[in-house]
């Protein structure tokens, strides 16, 4: 059994981890770390201490709906993607421990294409 890093828990909610094959479990946000525990496999867990979080990026559609979010650690070299039943509530709980300037909106598909096209025609 895995020992939780949190001393105080702010939010526990059902969630999905998108590391390889999607797995279902519980997301726990506390004073020390972001934690995810798989419902069926106790060896499948993710614990991310707040001091290792580089930034959090959320996929926002129509400026209203958040489909999933990703937590980036170690200078953006590693990311963990999650979704929950209420992503806004999860991001608000994360905002207590991660500053607002590190909560980012991920670029849309069309935004990435537009930026790529402009960079092709940009004078160097």
Image (cartoon, rainbow, N blue to C red):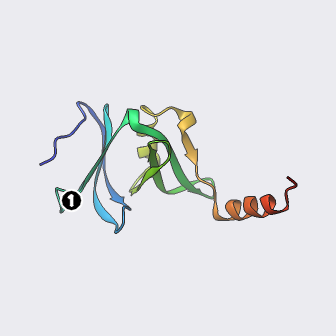
Tell me residue 58's x, y (percent).
Answer: 52, 51
Tell me residue 45's x, y (percent).
Answer: 25, 52
Query: Along the line of sight, which residue is nearer the eye, 11 or 52?
Result: 52
Residue found 18% across the figure and 63% down from its top: 40
Residue found 25% across the figure and 31% down from its top: 8
Q: Is residue 36 above or below residue 11?
A: below
Considering every residue shown, the one lying at the far bottom of the view is 21
Callout 1: SS:
loop
Q: How many marks?
A: 1
Considering every residue shown, the one lying at the far right of the view is 123
Left or right of 76, for residue 84: left
Residue position for label 1: 39
Query: Along the line of sight, which residue is nearer the eye, 71 or 24?
Result: 71
Tell me residue 92's x, y (percent).
Answer: 45, 39
Query: Along the line of sight, which residue is nearer the eye, 36 or 62?
Result: 36
Q: Tag 1: Cα neighbours inside 10 Å, few (<14), some, or many (≥20)?
A: some
Image quarter of residue 101: top right
Q: Is residue 43 above or below residue 20?
A: above
Left or right of 115, for residue 45: left
Query: Along the line of sight, which residue is nearer the eye, 119 or 17?
Result: 119
Residue found 41% across the figure and 45% down from its top: 90
Image quarter of residue 123: bottom right
Considering every residue shown, the one lying at the far left of the view is 1
Tell me residue 22's x, y (percent).
Answer: 34, 66
Considering every residue shown, the one lying at the far front of the view is 124
């Amino acid at each position: 059994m895995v020992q939780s890093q949190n001393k105080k828990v702010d939010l526990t909610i059902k969630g999905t981890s998108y590391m390889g094959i999607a797995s279902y479990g519980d997301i726990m946000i506390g004073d020390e770390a972001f934690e995810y525990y798989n419902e069926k496999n106790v060896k499948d867990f993710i614990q991310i201490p707040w001091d290792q979080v580089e930034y959090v990026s959320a996929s926002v559609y129509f400026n209203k709906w958040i489909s999933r979010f990703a937590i980036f650690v170690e200078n953006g070299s590693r990311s963990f993607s999650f979704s929950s039943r209420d992503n806004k509530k999860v991001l608000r709980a994360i905002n207590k421990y991660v500053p607002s300037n590190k909560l980012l909106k991920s670029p849309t598909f069309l935004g990435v294409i537009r930026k790529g096209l402009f960079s092709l025609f940009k004078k160097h």
